[in-house]
Amino acid sequence: MQETDPLIFKYLDIKDEGGLNLKLEPAPAGYADLFDRPVMLKKLDLELDFSVGVDTILLEGRVSAELEMECARCAEPLTRSFEDTFDEVYPDTVEYIDTREVIRETIGLLAPIKVLCSDSCKGRCLVCGTNRNRQSCACKAEKASPLEALKGLRVEKQEKPGKKDI
Ligand SMILES: [Zn+2]
Ligand SMILES: [Zn+2]
Protein backbone atom coordinates (compact mmCIF):
# COMPACT_ATOMS: atom_id res chain seq x y z
CA MET A 1 0.00 0.00 0.00
CA GLN A 2 2.82 2.38 0.91
CA GLU A 3 4.46 2.09 -2.48
CA THR A 4 1.34 3.17 -4.31
CA ASP A 5 1.14 6.66 -2.81
CA PRO A 6 2.68 9.12 -5.30
CA LEU A 7 4.28 11.02 -2.40
CA ILE A 8 6.15 8.02 -1.03
CA PHE A 9 9.40 7.01 -2.71
CA LYS A 10 11.75 4.10 -2.34
CA TYR A 11 15.10 5.36 -1.05
CA LEU A 12 17.06 2.98 -3.23
CA ASP A 13 15.14 3.92 -6.38
CA ILE A 14 16.15 7.56 -6.00
CA LYS A 15 19.70 6.65 -5.03
CA ASP A 16 20.09 4.37 -8.05
CA GLU A 17 18.80 7.11 -10.34
CA GLY A 18 21.23 9.59 -8.83
CA GLY A 19 18.38 11.91 -7.88
CA LEU A 20 14.91 12.77 -8.99
CA ASN A 21 12.99 15.85 -10.00
CA LEU A 22 9.29 15.81 -10.51
CA LYS A 23 6.29 18.04 -10.71
CA LEU A 24 2.92 17.03 -9.41
CA GLU A 25 -0.53 18.52 -9.28
CA PRO A 26 -2.17 16.85 -6.29
CA ALA A 27 -5.94 17.08 -6.07
CA PRO A 28 -6.85 20.00 -3.77
CA ALA A 29 -9.56 17.90 -2.15
CA GLY A 30 -6.91 15.88 -0.32
CA TYR A 31 -5.80 19.01 1.53
CA ALA A 32 -9.12 20.79 1.99
CA ASP A 33 -9.10 19.95 5.72
CA LEU A 34 -6.04 22.16 6.22
CA PHE A 35 -8.07 25.32 5.69
CA ASP A 36 -10.98 26.88 7.50
CA ARG A 37 -13.68 28.83 5.77
CA PRO A 38 -13.62 31.23 4.09
CA VAL A 39 -10.22 30.03 2.85
CA MET A 40 -10.49 27.41 0.12
CA LEU A 41 -7.77 25.63 -1.78
CA LYS A 42 -8.42 25.84 -5.52
CA LYS A 43 -5.26 24.56 -7.14
CA LEU A 44 -2.01 22.99 -6.04
CA ASP A 45 1.37 22.65 -7.71
CA LEU A 46 4.17 20.69 -6.21
CA GLU A 47 7.79 20.35 -7.21
CA LEU A 48 10.07 17.82 -5.55
CA ASP A 49 13.79 17.78 -6.14
CA PHE A 50 15.78 14.95 -4.59
CA SER A 51 19.57 15.01 -4.59
CA VAL A 52 21.70 12.13 -3.43
CA GLY A 53 24.42 12.71 -0.85
CA VAL A 54 26.94 10.30 0.64
CA ASP A 55 24.55 8.66 3.08
CA THR A 56 21.51 10.91 2.84
CA ILE A 57 19.03 12.14 0.32
CA LEU A 58 18.12 15.81 0.39
CA LEU A 59 14.67 16.88 -0.66
CA GLU A 60 14.07 20.45 -1.74
CA GLY A 61 10.41 21.07 -2.32
CA ARG A 62 8.27 23.90 -3.57
CA VAL A 63 4.57 24.24 -3.09
CA SER A 64 2.37 26.78 -4.76
CA ALA A 65 -1.30 27.05 -4.15
CA GLU A 66 -4.18 29.10 -5.39
CA LEU A 67 -6.36 30.08 -2.49
CA GLU A 68 -9.77 31.62 -2.53
CA MET A 69 -10.11 33.97 0.40
CA GLU A 70 -12.10 36.99 1.51
CA CYS A 71 -10.90 40.55 1.72
CA ALA A 72 -10.47 41.36 5.42
CA ARG A 73 -12.14 44.74 4.93
CA CYS A 74 -14.92 44.36 2.38
CA ALA A 75 -15.38 40.55 2.51
CA GLU A 76 -15.41 40.22 -1.28
CA PRO A 77 -14.02 36.88 -2.49
CA LEU A 78 -10.58 36.97 -4.08
CA THR A 79 -8.13 34.43 -5.41
CA ARG A 80 -4.41 34.66 -4.75
CA SER A 81 -1.41 32.44 -5.31
CA PHE A 82 0.99 31.65 -2.50
CA GLU A 83 4.25 29.79 -2.62
CA ASP A 84 6.70 28.32 -0.15
CA THR A 85 9.68 26.01 -0.11
CA PHE A 86 10.88 23.34 2.28
CA ASP A 87 13.92 21.10 2.80
CA GLU A 88 14.11 17.70 4.36
CA VAL A 89 17.01 15.29 4.79
CA TYR A 90 16.47 11.54 4.79
CA PRO A 91 19.13 9.18 6.18
CA ASP A 92 19.99 6.02 4.28
CA THR A 93 18.56 3.97 7.13
CA VAL A 94 15.05 4.53 5.80
CA GLU A 95 13.53 2.25 3.22
CA TYR A 96 10.91 4.73 2.11
CA ILE A 97 10.91 8.49 1.81
CA ASP A 98 7.51 9.64 2.89
CA THR A 99 7.04 13.27 1.87
CA ARG A 100 3.37 13.50 2.80
CA GLU A 101 3.75 15.16 6.19
CA VAL A 102 6.22 17.89 5.27
CA ILE A 103 4.07 18.71 2.25
CA ARG A 104 0.92 18.94 4.33
CA GLU A 105 2.67 21.13 6.90
CA THR A 106 3.94 23.49 4.22
CA ILE A 107 0.57 23.77 2.51
CA GLY A 108 -1.17 24.34 5.82
CA LEU A 109 0.98 27.40 6.52
CA LEU A 110 0.47 29.05 3.13
CA ALA A 111 -2.59 31.14 3.94
CA PRO A 112 -1.81 34.53 5.46
CA ILE A 113 -4.00 35.62 8.36
CA LYS A 114 -5.64 38.24 6.24
CA VAL A 115 -5.60 39.62 2.73
CA LEU A 116 -6.97 42.79 1.22
CA CYS A 117 -8.52 43.05 -2.25
CA SER A 118 -6.39 46.17 -2.59
CA ASP A 119 -4.37 48.35 -0.26
CA SER A 120 -6.86 51.11 -0.82
CA CYS A 121 -9.94 48.96 -0.07
CA LYS A 122 -12.46 51.20 1.64
CA GLY A 123 -14.25 48.35 3.40
CA ARG A 124 -17.90 48.27 4.27
CA CYS A 125 -20.07 50.80 6.00
CA LEU A 126 -20.47 49.68 9.60
CA VAL A 127 -24.04 50.91 9.64
CA CYS A 128 -25.65 49.72 6.39
CA GLY A 129 -23.07 47.24 5.07
CA THR A 130 -22.60 48.95 1.72
CA ASN A 131 -19.35 48.05 0.01
CA ARG A 132 -17.70 51.46 -0.09
CA ASN A 133 -15.52 50.44 -3.04
CA ARG A 134 -18.65 50.28 -5.18
CA GLN A 135 -20.83 53.06 -3.88
CA SER A 136 -21.09 55.50 -1.06
CA CYS A 137 -23.93 55.63 1.37
CA ALA A 138 -25.62 58.39 3.31
CA CYS A 139 -24.83 57.02 6.76
CA LYS A 140 -23.01 59.21 9.21
CA ALA A 141 -19.56 57.90 8.50
CA GLU A 142 -17.47 58.25 11.64
CA LYS A 143 -18.40 56.63 14.89
CA ALA A 144 -16.88 57.96 18.11
CA SER A 145 -13.21 57.09 18.00
CA PRO A 146 -11.83 54.66 20.58
CA LEU A 147 -9.82 57.54 22.03
CA GLU A 148 -13.01 59.36 22.99
CA ALA A 149 -14.20 56.31 24.88
CA LEU A 150 -10.89 56.11 26.74
CA LYS A 151 -11.18 59.70 27.87
CA GLY A 152 -14.52 58.87 29.45
CA LEU A 153 -13.03 55.92 31.31
CA ARG A 154 -10.23 57.99 32.75
CA VAL A 155 -12.69 60.43 34.27
CA GLU A 156 -14.65 57.64 35.89
CA LYS A 157 -11.50 56.16 37.41
CA GLN A 158 -10.58 59.43 39.06
CA GLU A 159 -13.91 59.47 40.80
CA LYS A 160 -13.31 56.08 42.38
CA PRO A 161 -13.24 56.60 46.16
CA GLY A 162 -9.99 55.67 47.89
CA LYS A 163 -9.80 52.99 50.55
CA LYS A 164 -10.51 54.32 54.00
CA ASP A 165 -8.29 53.46 56.91
CA ILE A 166 -10.08 51.82 59.76
ZN1 LIG B 1 -11.72 44.76 0.01
ZN1 LIG C 1 -23.91 53.15 5.20
Image (cartoon, helix red, strand yellow):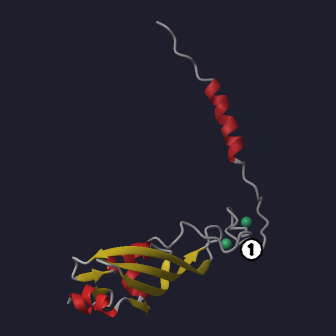
The answer to which of 9 and 69 lies nearer the viewer is 9
Residue at disc 1, CB closer than 8 Å to ligand 1: yes
Q: Is mark 1 on a helix, strand or loop?
A: loop
> Could you say where residue 81 lies in the image, as x and y percent from the top left?
57, 81
Name which quarter of the figure residue 159 lies in. top right
Check the picture and name the quadrant holding the N terminus.
Answer: bottom left
**Ligand 2 rendered quadrant:** bottom right
Q: Residue at x 53, y 66 (%)?
A: 113
Looking at the image, residue 111 lies above or below residue 17: above
> Could you say where residue 6 lies in the image, as x and y percent from the top left?
32, 91
The answer to which of 77 and 141 lies nearer the viewer is 77
Name which quarter of the figure residue 115 lies in. bottom right
Q: Please state if 75 lies on the left or on the right of 99 as rendered.
A: right
Q: Which residue is drawn at 33% across and 86% down?
A: 7
Q: Which residue is drawn at 51% across and 82% down?
A: 64
> Could you say where residue 85 lies in the image, as x and y percent from the top left?
48, 76
Q: Please state if 82 lies on the left or on the right of 146 as rendered.
A: left
The answer to which of 74 and 144 lies nearer the viewer is 74
Label 1, on which residue?
A: 133
